[in-house]
Image (cartoon, rainbow, N blue to C red):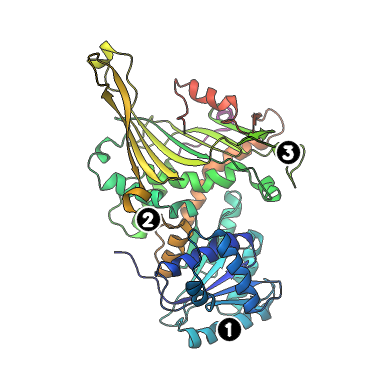
């Protein structure tokens, strides 16, 4: 049974930033519009620019009308807007935190938020320690009896193992692990949550979910967008840090984990941790063989010319930052021994889509294979975004007198099957944080293990002599030729999206 969201005050550090405008406030509005908001919630945005409550509400209304998944209804917005407040403060100003504490106490009395506090770090990671320490000085990290205090940390969770450990140390010095929610919006997507149901509630799949019956797994996250106005950030991150370390490894955990003993948060996260720990670590000389990195050049997207990555704003014209990564990986455990996992992520590709495909081994070379060409593999495709759903490719006889076999597809779409759009990921995750359910949030040890896998790859790329080359690909293509060659060496190819 799902935990019930509780009355609380939500404090957003970085209240005027892009994340707040595009995701957080629209998500909170949609929660209210769907009737799922707790009976008493106050949202306090904190940032440095001076604003009144009314000015902030008007700014957030404009953003919500632009980015909400459903049209804004005036009567619902008017009620929601009354719960929005603005606090002007620098992140390092101790007096500002004391003023925030006083305002939260006042909101407890006026709005009935019961002393419960949810602090959302939508600021730059280099501000986290400052925010944490000042929350501690103001006593805001310690809940009163009968209340709670929690912190949501937006990615990135560090940029390598060392910095991730330091970030965990900083947060744990003032907030316990059960107070800490590391958000990964991919885990809030309906199809990602459904992976466990698909696997463990359907007896036709789980007995086949192992090395005996599965030939390979592919995970693809493709984007038509470039770096847009995020060139400065992307130069310090790259596709491996920005997407593989968190989003795609999280999806791999859901596909690869063993069944948990129950549905408690730590039971599920314990099994996910085992998956990350079983990832085969690459030696420096193996990175060249098993990992391809690429960077988009000039090209065409949807019929329109787009610039090369190195010509984007705030990007080094000699940049070695990757916008594409393809990996061949293995999980060294009994369930997945010798099953290759192919993962790719890239910007400026022909289509925006995130998908997991599970490719089953071919039927034995008897019966039908004697009379026809080799039949294709059964493929279970899990579409994370867009058009969330699941499809299964199977073989069927073509009607007629000749004996011909073709692939057909059984398809399930969330929107058509359930008659309503799936909620945005941030909506589910914010509700879970208000309810105190950390199931869909990353635990500290899992984050560190993921970095322990990523670091050797980054280190191999960073050497100046004999480093694996940075491949190029034209925008609008499916990536560098070397990524296709990575698959071809195994007699396989990437699944067409």
Residue 241 inside the magenta-drawn segment:
no
> What residue does disc 2 label?
420
* Mark 3 Cα shell of 10 Å, populated few (<14), some (14-19), many (≥20): some
CA gap between label 2 and label 3 equals 42 Å
Q: Residue at x 62, y 78 (%)?
A: 53
Q: Residue at x 39, y 64 (%)?
A: 437
Q: Earlier in the sequence, mark 2 or mark 3?
A: 3
* Mark 1 Cα shell of 10 Å, populated few (<14), some (14-19), many (≥20): some
> What residue does disc 3 label?
310
Say how many tags the image has: 3
Q: Residue at x 63, y 63 (%)?
A: 123
- Magenta span: 279-288
Figure quadrant of residue 477: top right
Note whether residue 361 is visible.
Answer: no
Q: Is residue 163 above or below residue 54?
A: above
* SS class, disc 1: helix
Observer-nearest residue: 6 or 263?
6
Figure quadrant of residue 322: top right
Q: Is residue 422 above or below residue 437?
A: above
* SS class, disc 2: loop
Q: Residue at x 56, y 55 (%)?
A: 155
Q: Position of residue 200 (x, y in %)?
A: 27, 47
Q: Position of residue 352 (x, y in %)?
A: 53, 41
> What residue does disc 1 label?
103
* SS class, disc 3: helix
Q: Is residue 458 left or right of residue 452?
A: right
Residue 283 inside the magenta-drawn segment:
yes
Q: Position of residue 147 (x, y in %)?
A: 43, 79
CA gap between label 1 and label 3 equals 47 Å
Note whether residue 360 is visible.
Answer: yes
């Amino acid at each position: 049974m799902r935990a019930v969201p509780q009355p609380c005050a939500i404090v957003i550090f970085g209240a005027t930033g892009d994340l707040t405008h595009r995701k957080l406030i629209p998500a909170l509005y949609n929660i209210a519009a769907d009737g799922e908001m707790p009976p008493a919630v106050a949202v306090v945005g904190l940032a440095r620019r001076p604003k009144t409550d009314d000015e902030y509400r008007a700014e957030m209304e404009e953003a919500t009308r632009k980015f909400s998944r459903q049209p804004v209804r005036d009567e619902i917005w008017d009620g929601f807007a009354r719960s929005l407040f603005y606090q002007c403060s620098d992140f390092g100003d101790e007096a500002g935190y004391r003023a925030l504490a006083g305002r939260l106490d006042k909101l407890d009395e006026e709005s009935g938020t019961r002393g419960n506090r949810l602090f959302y770090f939508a600021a730059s990671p280099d501000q986290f320690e400052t925010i944490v320490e000042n929350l501690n000085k103001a006593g805001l990290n310690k809940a009163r009896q009968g209340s709670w205090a929690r912190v949501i940390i937006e990615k990135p969770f560090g940029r390598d193992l060392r910095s991730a450990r330091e970030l965990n140390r900083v947060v744990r010095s003032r907030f316990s692990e059960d107070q800490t929610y590391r958000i990964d919006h991919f885990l809030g997507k309906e199809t990602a949550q459904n992976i466990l149901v698909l696997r463990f509630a359907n007896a036709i799949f789980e007995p086949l979910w192992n090395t005996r019956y599965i030939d390979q797994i592919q995970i693809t996250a493709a984007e038509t967008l470039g770096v847009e106005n995020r060139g400065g950030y992307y130069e310090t991150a790259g596709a491996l840090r920005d997407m593989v370390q968190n989003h795609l490894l999280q999806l791999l955990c859901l596909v690869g984990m063993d069944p948990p003993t129950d549905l408690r948060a730590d039971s599920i996260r314990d099994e996910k941790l085992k998956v990350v720990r079983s990832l085969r670590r690459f030696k420096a000389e193996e990175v060249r063989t098993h990992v391809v990195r690429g960077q988009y050049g000039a090209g065409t997207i949807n019929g329109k010319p787009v610039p090369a990555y190195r010509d984007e704003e705030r990007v080094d014209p000699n940049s070695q930052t990757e916008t594409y990564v393809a990996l061949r990986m293995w999980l060294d455990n009994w369930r997945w021994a010798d099953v290759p996992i192919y993962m790719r992520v890239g910007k400026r590709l022909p289509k925006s889509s995130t998908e997991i495909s599970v490719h089953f081994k071919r039927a034995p070379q008897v019966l039908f294979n004697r009379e026809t060409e080799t039949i294709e593999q059964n493929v279970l495709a899990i579409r994370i975004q867009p058009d969330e759903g699941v499809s299964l490719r199977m073989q069927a006889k073509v009607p007629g007198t000749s004996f011909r076999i073709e692939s057909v597809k059984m398809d399930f779409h969330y929107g058509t099957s359930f008659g309503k759009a799936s909620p945005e990921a941030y909506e589910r995750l914010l509700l879970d944080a208000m309810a105190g359910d950390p199931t869909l949030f990353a635990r500290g040890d899992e984050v560190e293990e993921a970095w322990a896998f990523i670091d050797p790859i980054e280190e191999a790329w960073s050497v100046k002599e004999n480093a694996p080359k940075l491949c190029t690909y034209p925008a609008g293509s499916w990536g560098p030729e070397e990524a296709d060659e990575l698959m071809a060496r195994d007699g396989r190819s990437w699944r067409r999206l």
